[in-house]
Image (cartoon, helix red, strand yellow):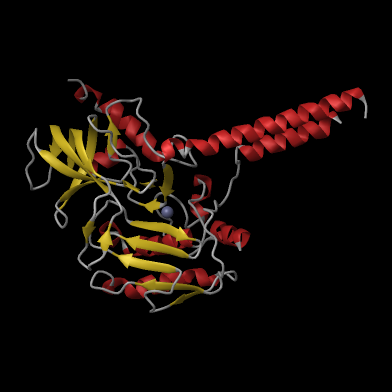
Amino acid sequence: MSKTNLRYTFLFIMFLTFVSLINMACERVAESGELTHLYVEASHPAFENLRDMEDKTPIILIGTKEAEINPYNFVDDTGREISEFSMAHIKVDKIIKNHDPISLDSEQMIPVLENEYQKDSTVFHIGGYQKMELGKKYLLFLYYSEHDNWYVINGVVFGKVPTSTSESLLYGQKGDSPSLPEKVIREAQESYKHFFGK
Amino acid sequence: MKKPLLFIMITLLLSTLSVSFAYVPNGWVLTYPTSCWFYISEDTNSSPYLNDLIYYTKQWNSLPELGLYQTYSPSDHNIAMYVVSYDTGNCALAQHYSDDYHTATFYPSWKNLSLTNRREVIVHEIGHCLGLAHTQSSNNSNSIMRQFNFNGKPYPLSDDKAGISSIY
Ligand SMILES: [Zn+2]
């Protein structure tokens, strides 16, 4: 083997090591803090843009997450034990729109269902949903479920808009970047930012 | 020596970045795809939809790699289907417990869809249980596994067929 060939072989081995190190680093991210995060495939309503989401949402408000029950356990009407989401307690800061017959007041606490839950050391993100952080403010596009007496985030991942633009939006999104929900959320952050101040 | 090595390096780099332009497998692989048993939890929630759940699950039987059959055994099956009354904002969810056990749950938002879209969601959720993730959006018009919105075609399309034949 010539000197040049030896040098390229060495470079090639270095490159292989580099690629496998990058792969290992990427796989570890999901398991940081001893929790395993899982993306759960979901079908949910989608909105073309902010206007579409506004038109199809009866309640728009700004609220602060004060507490959570994770996972939220209950027995459904057929007797099955359900443990597949968490429940946030949201303090209403400002009501922007309420077309629901049930009235809302600022300072009121409301239960809002979140499509992320933890079981043992596994965190499930339904449709890639990432739950709200305690103490933080969110712009929420909601509807009220009379059957369940809780509020539901419209479009699962679409209707939860962090008032901080640095907060990450979705867990484990594959495909388009930015994805459709990310585009709509960014549009909402821009359009409603005058509500986000004190 | 220089050129082949460069070629191998570029190929490796591309495969690391998982560049693909078609169906996306989700890693769930049935051991016996030609005898996949599905069970529908029959109650007041599911009763109006039983015929559709059976008929549109069996749409996957048009593919030679698959055979889906209904069973009434609540303990021995590969796919369990539930229609529920509590609202989480989802239309439907497919969940993975092991390679040979998945659930598909249908929520109130699914009941509110138009008839064709409701049927499309049934085929779509079963597609997840059979091993398909959401397709890349460039394939939306030829896949039941599109992530958002509908094609108005409640049966497996060309991208889905290619995906299943690559898995089984
Ligand atoms: Zn899906």
Residue occupying the point 32% across, 31% down:
A187
Question: Residue lying furthest top in this view?
Answer: A198
Question: Residue lying furthest bottom in this view?
Answer: B72
Q: Quadrant of ligand 1?
A: bottom left
| Residue B153 appearing in the image | no
| Residue A85 appearing in the image | yes
B155 vs B69, nearest the viewer: B69
| x and y percentages locating residue B137 in the rendered image | 49, 46
| x and y percentages locating residue B24 in the rendered image | 54, 51
Residue occupying the point 56% across, 70% down:
B32
Residue occupying the point 8% across, 40% down:
A104
Is residue A85 positioned above or below A13 on the image?
Answer: below
B17 vs A5, nearest the viewer: A5
In the rendered image, which quarter contains the N terminus of chain A?
top right
Q: How many marks?
A: 0
Is residue A133 positioned above or below B44 on the image?
Answer: above
| x and y percentages locating residue A180 in the rendered image | 40, 39
Q: Quadrant of residue A9?
A: top right
Is residue A123 positioned above or below B106 on the image?
Answer: above
Asked if residue B22 lies left or right of residue B155, the reply is right
Is residue B23 positioned above or below A164 on the image?
Answer: below
Q: Quadrant of residue B80?
A: bottom left
Question: Residue lying furthest right in this view?
Answer: A2
Asked if residue A38 lies left or right of residue A103, the reply is right
| x and y percentages locating residue A76 in the rendered image | 22, 62
B163 vs A99, nearest the viewer: B163
In the rendered image, which quarter contains the C terminus of chain A?
top left
